[in-house]
Each structure stands twice: as C-alpha cells, then as structure tokens.
Amino acid sequence: MKVKKNKEKQLNPFELHINNKKFTILGRKSKNEVGKPGIARSKSIQKRKKSLLLEYKLKDKSNKFVDRRIGEKNRAMTADDRVIARFTASRVKAQKKMKYNLGEEEDLTHHGQSLSTIEKFEKPMSDDDSDSDDDRNGGKLAAEFVEKAHFGGGVLSRAGDGETSHRDLIDKLIAESKLRKYEKKQLKQETNELTEQLDKDWKELMPVVPTKNRGETDIEDEPPTKKKVDKNSYDILMRSLKFDRRGMASDKLKSEEEIAKEEKERLEKLESERLKRMKGIEDDGIVKHRSADDLDDGFDFGDDDIQPLAYNSEGKPLNTDLISVNEEQNGLNDEENVDENEDEDEMESDEEESDEEVEDDNENENNLNNDMSDLKEDDVSSNDEETDTFTKNTDKNKSTKLFAKKLKEKKVIMDEARQQLPYTFIVAESYEGFQEILEDRSISEQTVIIERMIKVNHPSLGNDNRSNLQRLYPYLLQHLNDNSCSIDGWKILNTLAPHLYDLTQFFPEHAAKCLIEVLKEKHTDFVDSSPKQITSDMLIFLKLVPLLFPPSDYYHPVCTYAVMIASEILSQTKIKKRSDVASCLLLTTILLEYVQLSKRYIPEVVNMLRGMLLMATDNSSISYVQQFKPNNKILTLENNETQTEWSKKLSINEIFSEKNIDSVFKLTSLYVILDLVFRFSKLCEDIPSVNEIWAPHLSIITTLKINSDEMNAQIDKTKLQLQAIDKKLEKLQTISNRPKALRLYEPRIQKIYDGRTFKTESKEKAERSKLLHRYKREMKSAVREIRKDNSFLSKLKYHEQAKSDVERRNKVKQIYSWGANQAHEINKLAKKNKK
Amino acid sequence: MATISEFKQLFDTFLRENKCPTGEIVKKKYYFPVNQLKTIYTSMLTTTNIQWSQFQQMLTNYVENLDFCYYSWECFSLIVQNLNTDKTNVYMFTNLLGFIKIPTEKNEDDKLLFKNNKRPQFKYNSEQLKSWVTVVWDDMKPFMLSNIKVRREMLTLLIEKMQMHLNNPLVTADFLMDSLDTPGPIAILGLQGIFILVKDYNLECPNIYGKLYNFFTTDMFNYRYKTRLFYLADIFLRSTHLPELLVAAFVKRMARLSLVAPPTDIQIMAAFIGNLLIRHPPLKVLIQSDSVVGSDPYIFEEKDPLKSNALNSSLWELVSLKQHILPRVGKSVNFLFKKLPQVEWDMSELLDESYESMIDEEYKTDFQKVSLTYEKPVSFSVPLSNHMDDLWTLDD
C-alpha cells in the first residue's frame, strides 16, 4: 500500500504541464502553475461515464423496470435476512402513521384479519353472572361454565339427571344471550334519554351563567333550540363552551412601597418628557406609561399619584396634615358614592334597557366612582408631593395649609349644591339645550351639573359617550365665552378648570382644535375692533390654555398659537382707561405663567412693563417702546395721593371697571407692576443680555419716589433683584474651530498594471462589457465540452461497432467451420458409400 | 359744486373734440384740447362733495392713453401756478398727481386718445415734460412746508416718479435733507430720495451712514415705512468696502433693538445681521472671540456709529433671543451656532410678514399629537405657580 501511495504522489515529470510565469508577484497564489493533463483527461472520462454514458444507454427507452425489493440485489443476505429486513421496514412505516395516535394501540392481526374484529364475535358463554363479571373477564368463559361444559364428565355426568341435555343447555344459553342484548339496549336508551334531559336543563341554565359576551350568545343560541334542533347545535354549544372565558392570572397585589416607587418613576418620566419637549427635542418614539390596570380606553388619570400613608417607627403617620383632609374627603366621597348609586338607578329606569345589562353597567360604574373618589383624594396629596419634589418653594407648608383650607370651603359649598340637584344630566343636542340646563343656577350648581354630566357620560362606559363629551366641550367653551363679560366668567373658569382638564385628557386633539378655533375667533375680533382693546373673553381663553396644555413645550400647536396672539394683543392694544391697565397687567401675569417653567423671553411683556413704569413717572430720559406715547401719564402719582389705604392684590373685577383711575388703583397697579418686573427678571436671569433688557426698568425704578413704606420695600426688592444681575459676559465663541487637515498629495495609483490600459467607461457600459466577456468565455467552454462529449460518444460507438464486428466475424467463422465440418462429413459419407 | 353726472358730461364734450375739434389746429402740432382738460381738473379740485375714489373710477379709462397723461402734466403746471389753499383741495391735487403717471418715452403701441391721421402726429418731447414737472414741483413747495400730509404724499411722489423728470434733480436735495432731519416716517422717505440722488446723480452726502444709523431706534417698529427702511439699509450696507467699525455698529444696534422688537422684525433683523456677517468676514469677531468682558462695551446711546465701540462687543443679544418664546424666532438666530453659508439669505420674503400673517400661518399648520399637562389644576391658576394667586384676587 505504501509503495502504491508513493507512486500516486510521484507523478511522472513527462505527464506534467508547467506554465511558466514571467514575473513573480508577492502575495498572489496561482492555482494553475502545474497542470496534469493525463489525470484531468481521465477525470473527465470518468465523469462522462457516469453521466453521458448512462444517458446514452437509456436513449430511446421510455421506461424501465426497477427492482426495489429490499435486499434483492444484496447477495450477502440470505433469504431469511431479507424477510426480516422487509418486515422491520413495514413496521417502521406503520409506526410512522400512528405517531400521533396516542389513544390507539397498533392493530394486531391474525391471518390478515385484525384481532379486534375477531373479538367482536358473540361470546360463547351463558353465565347468569352480572355484566361486571364478564367485563372483568374480558370476554372469557366463566369458570363454572367451563367446568360444566368442558370438564367434569361432560354429557355423561349429566345423563343421570336426565332433565337437561346438552341441547337444552345450548338453547338456554341462546335465550340468555338474547335477554342480555335486550337489557343492554334498554339501558342505552335510558342513558340517551337522561343525556337529553341534561342538555335541556343546561340550556335553561345557560342565561343565568355569565359569559363573556352574553348578549350575543343569547341571541344566537335561543332561537335554534326553540325552532329547530339543527345538527350543528351540538357543535355550536361545544365551541361556545370551549371559548368560554377562563379565569386569568392577575398581577399580584403591590405593596405600598412599590406603588409609591412606581408613581415616583412615572412622575419623573413625565417630567423628563416635558423637559425634552421644552428644549425642543422631538421624541415621538416614547410610549406613554400605561398602568397594568389600564382599561385601554385612552383615559388618562393624569394625576393619579398616590401619597402612601406612611408611618414612622413609633407608629405615627408621617404626613399628619393630610390625614384630616383625607378623612373628611373620604366621608364626603362615601356620601357622594351613595348619591351616585341612586342617580344611576334613576338613569336605569329612564333608559329602560334589559335588566341584566344595566346591573352590569351599574357594577362598572360603582367601581369607577370609587376610582374617581380615590383620585380626588390623591389630587390633594399629589400636589403636595410635587411641590416637595419639583419646586424650591420656601413657603410650601403655608400654601399647603391654605390650599387644604380652601379646598374644604369649596367642598362645603359644593356639597350644598349637590344635595339640591338631580343626579343625571344628558348632554344636550344643541347649545340652546345646554343653556337651558344651566339657566338660573348658581356657579357652584352649574359646576356640579357639569361634573355630573361628565361622570354620567364617562367614555369608559361605552356607548357614544365619547362623542357626547366631545359635543360638550365646545358648549363649555361657549358657556365661558358667554359669561365672560363679567366677573362671573372668571369664577366659572375657576371652578370649571379641573373639569375641562379631565375632558381634555379624554380627547386631546379634539380639545386642541376647539381651543384653536376659539382663539382664532378672538384674534379676528381683536384685529377687527377699533380701538384695539383687550376684552375679558380673550383673557379667559388665554388663561385656560396653560391649564390644559403644557406651555413649557418648545413648540405646542395650541400654546404657541396662544402666545402669538397674546403677544400681538399686548403690543397693539391701546391703553387709555383703568380697565386697559388692569387687562394688560392681567395678560402679563398670564404670560408669566406660560414661561414660568420654560423661562423663555417675551419682548412684548418687557416692553409692556417698561411702558407701564414710564406711565408712572415723569422720567423722560428713557425712550418709549411699542404703543406707549410720552403724553400718556395716567399712572403718575401725586405726592398727596400716597396716604390712602390700598391692597397689594388687584381684583380681576378691575378689567370691567369703568371708573376713573384713582390713587388706590395707581398704587396697587404700581405695586403689581413692580412685582411683575421682579418675577420676570428673576425668571430670565440666565439669558446673557439680561442686563440690557432690564436696564431701562432699573433706571426708571431708581427715580421712583413714593411716600409709602410698603411700596418702598417693594421698590427696593425689585431694585436689588435687578442690580444683583451682574454677569461676567464671555465673548461668543459659537463655532468650535476644528483644525483643518492639510491636503495630502498622494501618488495616483492605478489598480492593476499589466501593460494594458483600462478604458474608462460608464458603469452600465462596463457592466455590459464584463457580461459579454463572461458570456464569450462560457460559450467557448460549453463548445469545448460538447466537442469532448461528441468525441467520447463517437469513441464509444466505434468500440461498440468494433465489438459487434468481431462478434459477427466470429459467428461467421463458426458458421463456416460448421459448414466445413458438415461438408467434410458429407464428403466422408460419400467416400464411404463409394467404397 | 358739481355732481358726478356733470363731470361725465364734461368728459363727453371733452371726448367729442376728437371728431370735431373746436379749437384751432396749428400746423405741425398734435391737437389736444388742453384748455378743456384744465377746466375739468380745476372743477375737480374745487368740488368738495365728491370723493377721490369716484374721480379715480372716472379717470381709469383715460390714464392708459399716452397723450392724455402727457398733456395732463401741462394742465397741472398751469393749475399749480394758481393753486390756492382756500379754494382748492391741495391734498386731492397730490392724489391726482399720483394717479396720472409721467410717460417716459413714446412707443409705437402706446394708445392715443386723440389720434387722427389727418392731423399732425403726436410727438414726445422729454424736455417739455421735464419743464412742466419742474414747475409743478417748485410751486408745490409752499404747500408742502405747511401741510405734513401733503408733504408726505409729495415725497412719495417725488421718490417714485417725479425725481427723474425734474430739470435738475439735485435741487431737491435740500428739501430731502430737511425731511431727513424731521422725526418720524417722513425721514425715511427723505432718506430714500437722498439715496436715489446719491446713486443716480452723484450727490455727495456727508454722514449719510450716521443718519441711517440713527434711524434704528426703538421707535422704528411703529413706523409706517419700517420695511422700506430695512430695504434701504440693506442696499446702503451692500458694499463690501465699508469700514468694519461702521457695519459692526449697525449689527450691534440691530441686535440690541431686537431685544424689544416684535417677532417678525426680529426675524428680519436676524437675517440682516447674518447677511452682514457673511458680507464682512472680519465681523466674525462678534461671534468668534475668547475674551471675557465685565459688561457689554457697546454704547447704545452714542449717535456716531464709529464711536459706539461695537467691534469690541459680541452678539449676546442674539444668543438671548434663542430663549424667545416663539420657536420661529428662536430658530431664526440658529445661524450663530453653525457655519455661516456662502450665500446670503433672502430678506425680501420676511419683509412682508406681520403679526397677522404669522398667526394665520400658525393657524393653518396641521398637527397630529398634542401633549398635555399632567398636573390637574384645582382653580384657574396654573399648578405649582403662585403668580396668579399672589397678584390677583377674584374678590372685589
């Protein structure tokens, strides 16, 4: 073997074909350095023998007989081996079929008949024993019978009795068998009857059992049972049972810490989203957090953060100041719940729907109300929590207490209103209808009505509640608009704001569109009016916007629009009367709320405050801006005017006031102006040119001389704030100067250098020529192959021909030799005969 | 006193002149009944009960005709010599002057009202026309000085068409300089007149840039001709050979003003500043420097742009405007933080914007998603803010 291997490896140098290389190129592996023509040729011949030769042999033959019996061609196998192999193959095949047929055993056969069919034959037994017995025996004859019939003397032993011959015995056996058959039949019938009875009972029971969509099954199932029992009824029933709702695994109850943690995370996430929007980074990919209990109705609780009732180590509650409020509220809410249960009952009787359905609804609603009452509690606590976390408000405790007190008062008033009103209100089809409902009601009563309207039509209750509420939204805005000409409008806004907030959470886009339309209307009113004046309705809606939509967003379809309108109004309104001054200051305060988180800069507000301050002084060194003119000095105080009593807060009623400007108003508004300057300058401390912005204000304020301690305190405070802004300005260096890379002159390297230059062609053309080249090569090689095939075939044919020729020649020779032999023998005979 | 129907009658008789001329036909002279037209105009000016718009309607049919316009100016030159504030409406006269255009030259396809092949052809004589226009201008002067409204109208007229038809346009320079010094919008018109003189008639105007610089005040946003001012300033500062100190002063002035400007003007000024920075590469020192200063060295109150110390300053104002409440304004100063482009921005489309157009555009923008506040308000004051509660009360 070793010698042979070596022989194979050591090729005859005369059998090699060596391709000479002109150049040796580094890093290139050449495949075709040495060719072995002999080996290659023999390989190709072998290949052809396997492919072409076979085809040639099968030429002009339409079919062939293939023996596929197992082991038939294998000579090493004996006949027994073959049988065994075939049997195992058939068993394997059968096994494959039954792979998923878990219940059934394989069918055993005997003489080609399955054993089960054989067992179906009547059992040749005549025992009186109970069925259970022969069940257990599995069809075998009872021991007694066997003893009697087969053993124990047989016929001869009984011959003495004489009574029962063997024949009688057989007859008896037959009779018994018949009886048993009859009994079986009877039993079967009874079982059938019982099943039918059970089915009937089940159907009667069906409506009582709650199913997933009971309403539908009622309609589907009942008619077929009454009218016709069609053959699919069983299937239908089976399916309905199959798809019946199963008990679902629910999340485990969360501990208080977990809930608190989740809430904290949720709030942090919302805040970070808000910050992102404020900076103008758009991120739509973020999916809003959804609670596990989300009903998937798009309802957003918004502020459902729960202040956990936490205790310290001594067992005393940590947040005691909340508990009193919460307890009271709980009491109130309980009553409220009772009320609302009643009111739903009323609604049910009104609506006259099927009893079950209403019950169902009622349950839902109760749950819902409980939820809502919980939420209300949470509002109180959440606000506190948020002040803790987000604002560095120093007097938060004070405000919390104040807030709680306010809320209590409000609750008392609302409760009174609650008791005097009916419980359900339907959203009217038209605005006139809506007005009728609210007519002659006090503001608190109106609020309760609207609150109930929203509750009754909560979107999670299904129906077309969502569209009802969508209809209600413009009504509410219109209601605000209609009442805007007096202080009532503001009071309504004050109480209605939370409800509008709730509604906005249901359908943000619709609400946004409604508000934009309203703002558009207000804007056109302003543009068309002459002289241009701020009216209360504009202010109300501009006030409403930041309550519902985040004004801190870098861009927000509603808020940006509102700000545009507000700034136009602020820069173009004419200031002549007391009400003008008040409205301008109110609008300025509203705009302060817009920018309170985003800390953005509004030139119109700064100009407005500058103009207002100028109106209060005789200072002439500061230039006038916007709509302010030097001759308009309506706020200038005389020296003797400062001794009156004045409050530090302006009343919203002032924007409706037709009175002349008196000293009290002058003092109060000056105080408010200074306060606004203080607040705004504090907000935009961070912007670089804050000094330049507030310089005119500062110079006016320094010249203010007023004989009032409180006012002077305010002036000093504002002055200090404005002076404190002392910035070291760094000169701008906006673009970081990246060092510019030197341009490098590298040699132009041609990809391949082999004497040929490549044509520069277009991409398509190059592709085409490449393909053409490849096609030519392929064509050549194909032709070569065909040529080789032909030579192979012709050789084959020649060999066959030669073979057959040799055969024929041999045969001819043989025949000649026979003939010669015969002739020889004939000649021999002839010679004999002659002799 | 006359009614519209009487005027119509007058015009009818005036038109009939074409077919049957009543006046004498002088040889080689185009026939046009100047006297009749003059009477029509004079009666127009003396009536008080008819609105200008009604006259305008009557005249629209005739102003297309070259000869009508041409000879109208002859009438005006005749009328203006006897113009009297007591009897005639001078303001109406300025309207009339504004409505009838000054024909520049005669074309073949121009329409003629009194065209007749039998009579001599119409000849356009620019010298003649110039003398008429000059007479009108000279004689209107006393009215201009007494009445500010007339003055404004005449200035607009001068700038838009009369200046190039005067015998010597440079005579208006005095008047224009006077207007330039009067405060208010008239000054801008004066500036434009001066600009035309400087550009077309080689007037050398001392300290024109100083004057232009002083137009940029807080008042400019209330001016009627605000956009005209921006347009002119853009042209004035177009030269790349202006001293950097001067341009820097303009840039700084506008930046400072943009702190108190309405949003549309901020956008214009931001684009303008950007353009100036592109035009004058050395000005990049305003946005590209690494020293620290205590406060802004620029002196806003300084009247002389060259002494305003603007080059030592930096454009903090524009960085501040990034915090502007309207996103579009914030975006308009973004160029500060990017590489300046090679090509200037087109300011012309910004010039026409106003609060209304901005708000309308915003109204039309579509939106898909609306973000909401997540803190429920309990009253009308925004949660977590005490501004409303501290300053306002619902009680009386």
Image (cartoon, rainbow, N blue to C red):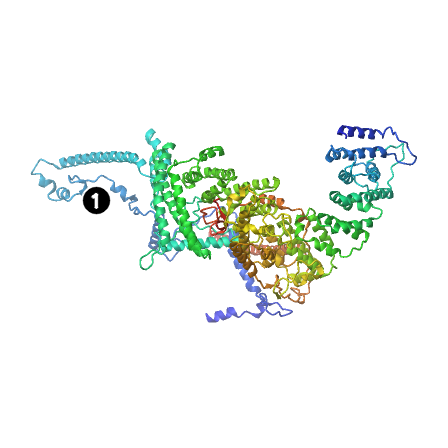
The image shows residue A408, relative to residue A423, as above or below, that is below
Q: x, y percentage for residue A195?
A: 26, 36
Q: Position of residue A143 (x, y in %)?
A: 15, 44
Work out which quarter of the rendered image holds the N terminus of chain A and state it.
bottom left
What residue do we see at 11% from left, 36% from top?
A165
Residue denoted by label 1: A138
- Label 1 secondary element: loop
Where is B212 relative to B83, above or below? below
> In which quarter of the view is residue B39 placed?
top right
Figure quadrant of residue B13: top right
Q: Nearer the viewer, residue A795 or A453?
A: A453
- Tell me where residue A14 appears, x and y as whole percent: 58, 69
Q: Could you tell me if residue A498 is visible in this image?
A: yes
Above or below for A483 versus B346: above
Name the residue rendered at 76%, 57% in the picture: B207
Residue extending farthest front = A640
What residue do we see at 75% from left, 29% from top?
B3
Can residue A814 be seen by looking at this rendering?
no
> In screen coordinates, is A720 left or right of A167?
right
Front-most of residues B392 and A371: B392
> As drawn, which residue projects farthest toward the right?
B27
| Neighbourhood count class around disc 1 (C-alpha, 10 Å): few under 14, some 14–19, many 20 upward | few
